[in-house]
Image (cartoon, rainbow, N blue to C red):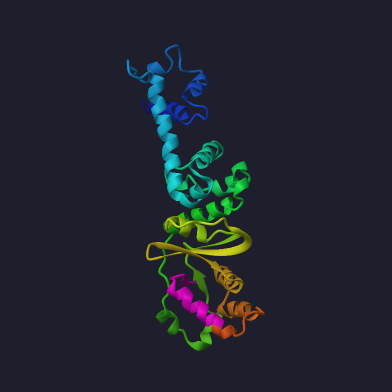
Amino acid sequence: MPTRLKKLESLLYRLITAPSGVAEGLAAERELGADGLDAIVRGDDRLSAQERVDIYANMYFYRILDALKEDFPATVAVLGGDSFHNVVTGYILEYPPTEPSLLYCGRYLAAYLRDHPLRDGASFVADLAQLERAILEVFHGPDAAALGPDSLRAIAPTDWPAIKLAVHPSAQILALDWRVSELPRAVEENRAWKPAERGAAKVLVWRRDARVFHRDLERVEAEALEEVARGARFAQICDVVAGHADVENPVTAMNQMLARWLSDGLLVRG
């Protein structure tokens, strides 16, 4: 019985997810026998066996489409509903779901959009999708106790050069080619959005108190945070800040960044 059930489940999955529809999927099933699908799925005067399976096939696609619309609202706004529908149709063929959870469905959408012809009118859309995916991943990312100011005040001044901090494990720093940070906010707030401008940008995405935030990083802060993420000692991080020609007072700059990181709940113990 378990073997028969497994075969039945596998057959229905192949039919429901067949790229060209249930009818063509059936044509490829050579082992169904003379009665075909009717021997497995009961039809009636209202719906044939194939029409019943078609319902599940449509539900499969539209459930994924709806989930991706929820995960990528700004991408939908830029491409338009019809174009996004077409993108998802091709995307599922190239990247069929491999996990039970819908959380993972959009994992490769940004990569898929980088060479998609529909991006020609909005070359920034792949970076936008990458940012929206990061926002989702950060929301669901691992948790850890963030450091507060009091925990750092307890460190003796002589020990500061050697201490190691770490970036919260849920946070991400994105390296993008387009300045897309404002687009998700505009769409979320129902404001008119403008096409993103081209320009290299480092974007920090982090979570605090179950809310996800993102902002562009100035070059010095991006490099300092990347040093933190690499496990550098505090003295090395300060050297990075001091090495920037546009930083007039490295001590003040470092103190301001550290205060902001602590306020954002961005740091954990290294």
| Magenta run includes residue 135 | no
Q: Position of residue 198 (x, y in %)?
A: 63, 59
**Rendered view: 238 above or below 59:** below
Q: Magenta span: helix, strand or loop, mainly?
A: helix
Q: Which is nearer the eye, 186 or 205?
A: 186
Label total for image: 0
Q: Position of residue 112 (x, y in %)?
A: 58, 45
Residue sitting farthest toward the top = 34
**Rendered view: 203 above or below 244:** above
**Rendered view: 91 above or below 150:** above
Q: Which is nearer the eye, 100 or 174?
A: 174
At horizontal 43% and vertical 56% (from top left) the residue drawn is 188
Q: Could you tell me which quadrant the N terminus lies in?
A: top left
Residue 77 placement, left or right of 202:
left
Asked whether residue 3 is in view, the answer is: no
| Magenta run includes residue 267 | yes
Q: Quadrant of residue 117?
A: top right
At horizontal 53% and vertical 21% (from top left) the residue drawn is 28
Q: Which region is colored magenta?
A: 253-270
Residue sitting farthest toward the left = 45
At horizontal 47% and vertical 75% (from top left) the residue drawn is 260
Q: Position of residue 47 (x, y in %)?
A: 35, 19
Q: Which is nearer the eye, 28 or 72?
A: 72
Residue 139 placement, left or right of 177:
left
Residue 126 placement, left or right of 37:
right
